[in-house]
Amino acid sequence: MSDDKSNRGPADAQRINVNEDYEVQYWTRVLDVSEEELRAVVKRVGVMAADVRKALGKA
């Protein structure tokens, strides 16, 4: 069985883990933002998905 995580969602849907490539790909697609923007917002408001969505105006 392959360990390909590219089609998976996040391990925890309430938190954004920018240290996992597959999660970064998931969240950038779902939130329609660039990787750089996602990382900047997570750095500014923390890893909670609800806080990131709010900061991006996607709540």
Image (tube, grey):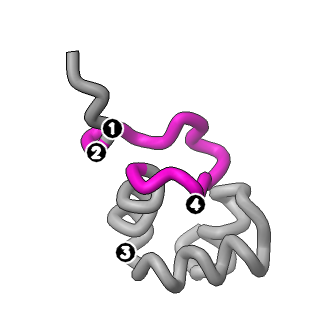
* Residue drawn where x is 77% and y is 66% of the image: 46
Q: Distance from label 2 to label 3 (Cα)?
A: 17 Å
**Looking at the image, which residue sits at the far right?**
45
4 or 3: tag closer to the N-terminus:
4
* Residue drawn where x is 64% and y is 57% of the image: 49
The answer to which quarter of the image holds residue 1 is top left
Q: Which mark is residue 13?
A: none
Mark 2 neighbour density, 10 Å: few (under 14) some (14–19) many (20 or more): few
What's the amino acid at mark 1?
Lys
Residue range in magenta is 6-22
Q: Distance from label 4 to label 2 (Cα)?
A: 14 Å
What's the amino acid at mark 3?
Asp
Q: Position of residue 7 (x, y in %)?
A: 26, 41
| Residue marked by disc 4 | 18
Mark 3 neighbour density, 10 Å: few (under 14) some (14–19) many (20 or more): few
Q: In the displayed structure, does residue 49 sit left or right of residue 44?
A: left
Q: Secondary structure at mark 3?
A: loop
| Residue marked by disc 2 | 6
| Residue marked by disc 3 | 32
Q: In the displayed structure, does residue 10 sit left or right of residue 18?
A: left
Q: Secondary structure at mark 1?
A: loop
| Residue marked by disc 1 | 5
**Looking at the image, which residue sits at the far front?**
2
Q: Position of residue 8 (x, y in %)?
A: 34, 37
Mark 1 neighbour density, 10 Å: few (under 14) some (14–19) many (20 or more): few
2 or 3: tag closer to the N-terminus:
2
3 or 1: tag closer to the N-terminus:
1
* Residue drawn where x is 59% and y is 75% of the image: 39
